[in-house]
């Protein structure tokens, strides 16, 4: 398991998928939220899981008992299902596959045409493209270009040993991972009445959506998600979004806090995001103070008038 320190925080990198905007970096803040709210023996649900970076870090470090990884994208679902139910076969492919543009073409073809129920083939092709494409974007081209003249080549992000270790680690915890392929709202509804459920919703963002993910949300989906979360009975939840004014319009009566993924008190942050909290959730002091710093920094930057 890769363990690095980011801005004084521990980051556990367990997800084998590269995800633009991946939330593995939220691990330590989620851990604090779960502890402060006595949710450490809860079932933790990501209805829009993508790389599921935070879910896996919380499970494997023992912060939660069970996780639910749901994604509507059939290719992302196939990947998770193959890793959880066919880890040995998946690892065999990982250790033997060629890293070349010809193989990239082959995997690309599988990705486009494979039977959606062949989770091993489709899931592996998804993983292969995710690890060999520029920025991990599934419809981007290979790192280094088709002529491999770029500075980095197709194998730059495909460390077989490290990735096999992540697959092995996940498979050791497979009996505590449920994988599904539904609309995120259905998953939220299913756990809505459970006291022992904690939902972390990270839907496709407003401004980046479209170019990064295959299942872009439409504005009606954002509204429908807000209605769905408003009807959650007992489960506690948080939601993250990019920092756009529409979030305040959709969630006017909820506590919302700005945060930066690579927060450091000594640097001016660029991209901030918003976290929305369900009514009964206690917000840890650590999150309140980071939020206050960000608001202060934003005010200073504005006053500077540049
Ligand atoms: C912002 S990404 C999630 C990033 C993720 N939390 C991470 O840390 O890597 C959103 C994900 O939601 C999925 N998605 C899009 N529409 C969905 C829907 N209606 N229901 C469930 N998942 C959906 C996309 O396939 C994408 O993987």
Image (cartoon, grey):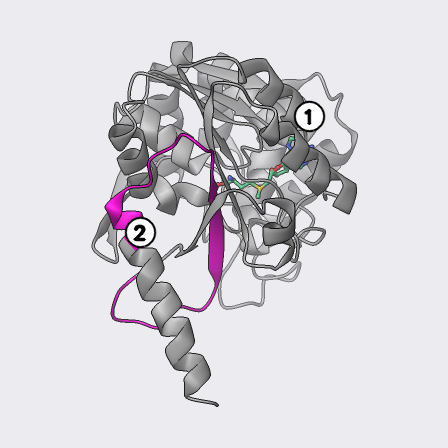
Q: Which residue shows up at 30% across the image and 25% down it?
A: 60
Q: What residue does disc 1 label?
A: 183
Q: Quadrant of ligand 1?
A: top right
Instruction: Give the labeled residue for mark 2.
Output: 288
Q: Position of residue 213 (x, y in %)?
A: 66, 45
For residue 3, which quarter of the picture?
A: top left
Question: Dominant secondary structure of the magenta stretch?
Answer: loop
Asked whether 50 or 48 is in front, the reply is 48
Residue 75 position, x and y percent, is 66, 30
Q: How many labels does the image show?
A: 2
- Residue at (58% x, 67% y) in the render: 149
The kind of secondary structure element at disc 1 is: loop
In the displayed image of the protein, which residue is found farthest to the left? 8
Looking at the picture, tell me which residue is in the foreground, 122 or 279.
279
Label 1 CB-ligand 1 distance < 8 A: yes
Label disc, if present, on residue 163 of the rendered structure: none
Single out the mark in the foreground, 1 or 2: 2
Span highlighted in magenta in the image: 264-288
Residue 166 higher or lower than 100, as above or below: above
Q: Does residue 226 sit above or below 6 in this rendering?
A: above
Q: Is residue 286 magenta?
A: yes
| Relative height, residue 213 to residue 179 (above, below) | below
């Amino acid at each position: 398991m890769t363990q690095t320190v980011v801005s004084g925080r521990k980051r556990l990198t367990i997800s084998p998928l590269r995800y633009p905007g991946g939330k593995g970096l939220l691990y330590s803040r989620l851990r604090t939220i779960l502890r402060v709210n006595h949710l450490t023996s809860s079932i933790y649900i990501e209805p829009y899981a993508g790389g599921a970076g935070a879910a896996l870090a919380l499970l494997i470090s023992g912060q939660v008992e069970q996780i639910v990884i749901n994604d509507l994208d059939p290719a992302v679902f196939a990947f998770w299902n193959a890793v959880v139910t066919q880890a040995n076969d998946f690892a065999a492919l990982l250790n033997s596959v060629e890293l070349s543009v010809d193989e990239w073409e082959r995997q690309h073809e599988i990705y486009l045409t494979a039977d959606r129920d062949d989770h091993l083939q489709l899931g592996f092709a998804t993983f292969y493209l995710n690890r060999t494409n520029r920025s991990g974007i599934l419809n981007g081209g290979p790192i280094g270009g088709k002529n491999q003249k770029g500075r980095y080549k197709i194998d730059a992000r495909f460390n077989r040993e490290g990735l096999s270790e992540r697959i092995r680690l996940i498979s050791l915890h497979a009996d505590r991972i449920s994988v599904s392929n539904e609309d995120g709202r259905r998953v939220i509804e299913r756990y809505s009445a459970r006291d022992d459920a904690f939902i972390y919703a990270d839907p496709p963002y407003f401004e980046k959506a479209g170019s990064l993910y295959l299942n872009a949300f439409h504005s009606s989906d954002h509204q429908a998600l807000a209605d769905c979360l408003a009807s959650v009975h007992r489960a506690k939840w948080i939601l993250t979004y990019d920092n756009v004014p529409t979030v305040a319009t959709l969630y006017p009566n909820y506590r919302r806090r700005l945060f930066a993924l690579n927060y450091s008190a000594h640097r001016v942050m660029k991209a901030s995001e918003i976290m929305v909290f369900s009514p009964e959730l206690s917000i840890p002091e650590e999150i309140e103070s980071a939020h206050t710093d960000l608001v202060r920094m934003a005010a200073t930057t504005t006053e500077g008038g540049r």
